[in-house]
Image (cartoon, helix red, strand yellow):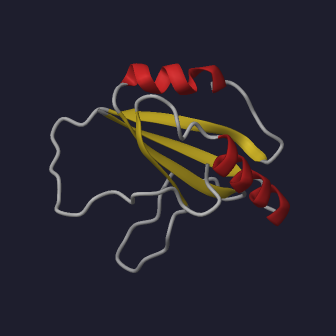
Amino acid sequence: MIVVLIHWKIRDDDSAQARFIQHWQEHSPVAAKGLIAEFLTRPGELTGFAPLPATAPDARNFFTFGLWESRRHFTDAIGKLFGDSHDFEHSVRTRHLFEPAHWRLGPASLPSANSPGTR
């Protein structure tokens, strides 16, 4: 299993953000072989938590956290997209891969369906 973090830096306007979210919901590889789960997030501001140091101050920052069965599954599904860009991006997104050394499972489970509007 691997964890992939994708940092999206979106142009700082509502139209670009809407196009990005629509793209993520409709064109991401939800049915890709080896994808366990994927979550699109924005950094939250919570008391007692440090801000992310790598955010782009002049962009709207989003992060995709993905759980994949293996590095091969991720690169087979996403590798063809490396190097592409979109008009809603402020600058090219970055991808980071983590290989868990240890893990634990809690009693809760992942959501059983995609979020509304996501394919």
- Residue 77: image location, x then y, percent: 53, 25
- Residue 7: image location, x then y, percent: 56, 45
Q: At 40% across and 30% down in the image, what residue appears?
A: 34
- Residue 85: image location, x then y, percent: 75, 33
Pick out the residue farthest to the bottom: 47
Pick out the residue farthest to the front: 112
Pick the front one: 31 or 39: 31
Q: Which quarter shows the N terminus?
A: top left
Pick the front one: 37 or 119: 119
- Residue 13: image location, x then y, percent: 82, 63
In screen coordinates, is 52 left or right of 110?
right
Pick the front one: 81 or 112: 112
Q: At 45% across and 28% down in the image, what residue appears?
A: 33
Quarter location, residue 93: top right
Rendered position, 14 above or below 100:
below
Rendered position, 59 above or below 44:
above
Q: How many labels does the image show?
A: 0
Q: At 68% across and 41% down in the image, what residue appears?
A: 27
Quarter location, residue 87: top right
Q: At 61% across and 48% down in the image, what residue appears?
A: 119
Pick the front one: 70 or 47: 70
